[in-house]
Image (cartoon, rainbow, N blue to C red):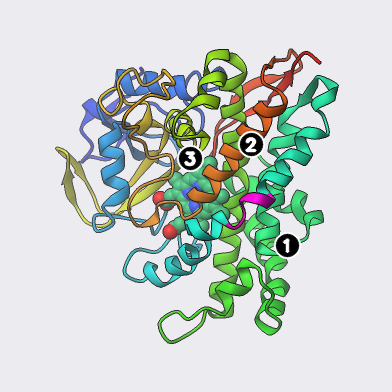
Amino acid sequence: MTILASDKAPAHVDPERVTDIDIYAPEGLAEDYHTAWARLQADNPEIVWTPRNEGHWIALGGEALAEVQADWERFSSRVIVLPKSIGEQHGLLPTTIDPPVHRPYRKLLNDNLKPAAVRGLKDSIREVAADLIDAFAARGHCDFTEEYAKIFPIRIFLALVGVPQSDAEKIRHWALCMTRPDQDMTFEEAKAAFYEYVDPLVRERFANPGDDMISNMLHSDMGGRQLTHDEALSLVTQLLIAGVDTVVNFLGYALLALAADPQLRRDMETHPGGTIAAVNELFRRFGLVAIAREVREDITFRGVTMKAGDMVAIPTVVHGIDPSANEDPMKIDLQRRRAAHSTFGSGPHMCPGQELARAEVAITIEEWLKRIPDFRISSDSDLENVGGIVASVKRLCLEWDV
Ligand code: HEM
């Protein structure tokens, strides 16, 4: 770890806590995102400062991270993307507002994504998974990233919100530009493109509601009123971004782990709680979203002096892989009694899409193992890990005997 001269940090930052960590490109990222963070966590205090990305704190300890995420009274969601000057343009509902204003928006999401709503989707999720896998199962190999991961969750999600499948590619592209630094559109341009796309869709659903999730949200009661047009643009854009890249990228990590470990495949199939219970351990092990919070007022947090306006990065990965939260955390252990993690966040903004995400991953694994019980990583893969708000493996190709 390089300790930088303290003059690179503001005066209130303890020089002992100054590090050199780029949260979007931690050292060792290319080989493995999770090992890179585990190393940083082992080598540093639980809260550090980095001058990268305009300078900010990082919660590296699992408990510290969960506390920052849950404590909205001290850590605001006004800005959740780093660097702060970019994050200030984010301004999407409901991610960048705090309780109590956050609550009615959140209720709209919860009502539409609650377990009962997801239960009703399981058959169609299974159908999509089976269709996609059947298309290549007899071939003995596939480009999992291109032929499955990038298609499956988007197909399900676009059907849920009533958006044509033919728009999947452009939606994914804009979402990528808003979650990764190295794309061909700036954050602002991608957000403008989203708004332009969502605007007619929202107008139409206000006038002629269908039975999709967007129509439901637009026509729901929010304490005596409905969403305004501007609020709807923001909420729908956020939903499209949040529901697209997360599951795509997570599936890459999940199938990579299964391809590398025959025993894990068998344990998945025979887990007493079923696949849906078993996948929680994969979510614990493979956290992948890195966001942030803004300090509201001058505080001392776990012995660290922070000033109003300081940013604190919360790379959710660090909770599940923290040895003080989970014993032998890099090991995938389906028998683990309690898998502590923040992969879906914690506190008021905890992911409302987690039931859907769990169902998508569990059903993928079930349908996959039914057809392809044994498989391996093929040499066509490019397993380089890529950073960003949502981390990923570049290209996972799999092969099996037919
Ligand atoms: C592997 C899959 C997923 C992961 C790892 C994930 C992770 C997260 C995390 C960490 C947050 C908290 C953000 C914060 O604290 O600021 C979040 C929020 C959110 N997620 Fe997910 N998510 C996933 C899938 C989904 C899906 C499938 C949907 C939509 C159907 C979704 C919709 C949302 C929304 C709308 C929010 C904002 C909630 C709020 O601000 O109150 N997510 N997600």
> Residue 88: image x %, image y %?
46, 57
Q: Is residue 163 left or right of residue 389?
A: right
Disc 2: CA contacts within 10 A as few (<14), some (14-19) or many (>=20): many
Residue closest to the eye, 361 or 37: 361
In the picture, the disc for residue 289 is: 3
Q: Amino acid at mark 2?
A: Thr
Quadrant containing the C terminus is: top right
Q: Amino acid at mark 3?
A: Val
Marks 2 and 1 in Cβ contact (< 8 Å)? no
Q: Residue at x 47, y 20 (%)?
A: 27
In the picture, the disc for residue 163 is: 1
Q: Residue at x 72, y 46 (%)?
A: 127
- Gap between marks 2 and 1, in whole Å? 22 Å
> Residue 336: image x %, image y %?
35, 25
Residue closest to the eye, 396 or 132: 132
Q: Indicate which label's residue lies in the foreground, 1 or 3.
A: 1
Residue closest to the eye, 229 or 58: 229
> Residue 361: image x %, image y %?
58, 38
Which residues, given as a range, are shown in magenta?
Answer: 120-124
Ligand 1 within 8 Å of the CB at mark 3: yes
Q: Residue at x 66, y 50 (%)?
A: 123
In the picture, the disc for residue 364 is: 2
Q: Is residue 255 left or right of residue 272?
A: right
- Gap between marks 2 and 3, in whole Å? 21 Å
Q: Indicate which label's residue lies in the foreground, 2 or 1.
A: 2
Residue 123 among magenta residues: yes
The quadrant holding residue 105 is bottom left
Which is more N-terminal, label 3 or label 2? 3
Q: Amino acid at mark 1?
A: Val
